[in-house]
Amino acid sequence: MKKVSESIELQEDICEIIELTSNDIETLAKAFDLINEVCELRFDDKEESQIVVH
């Protein structure tokens, strides 16, 4: 269950970042770069982990 709560937490963080940066496309692009880095760091070592954003 920990993975599920981590995934939900990450999705909430992503949604918040998108809301905060959606007015500025350049900032939004940087935010997505950071999101990708965080996702890679968090889930690289867990083979079965998957991020599903609805």
Image: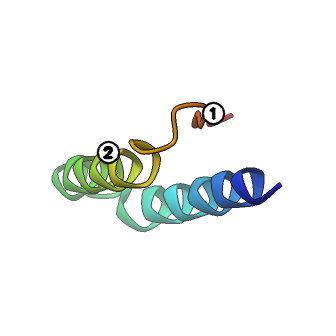
- SS assignment at label 1: loop
Instruction: State the residue position of label 1.
Output: 52
In the image, taking residue 37 as reference, residue 53 lies left or right, namely right
Question: Camera-side residue: 51 or 23?
Answer: 51
Picture coordinates of residue 5, whole percent (x, y):
75, 60
Question: Camera-side residue: 19 or 23?
Answer: 19
Instruction: State the residue position of label 2.
Output: 36
| Identity of the residue drawn at 46% across and 45% down | 43
Q: Tell me where residue 12 sits by quadrant.
A: bottom right
Mark 1 → mark 2, Cα distance in angstroms:
13 Å
Q: Amino acid at mark 2?
A: Asn
In the image, taking residue 37 as reference, residue 49 lies left or right, namely right
| Identity of the residue drawn at 58% across and 33% down | 50
Q: Tell me where residue 44 sits by quadrant.
A: top left
| Identity of the residue drawn at 56% across and 56% down | 15
Q: Amino acid at mark 1?
A: Val
Picture coordinates of residue 36, whole percent (x, y):
32, 45
In the image, taking residue 46 as reference, residue 44 lies left or right, namely left
| Identity of the residue drawn at 68% across and 34% down | 54
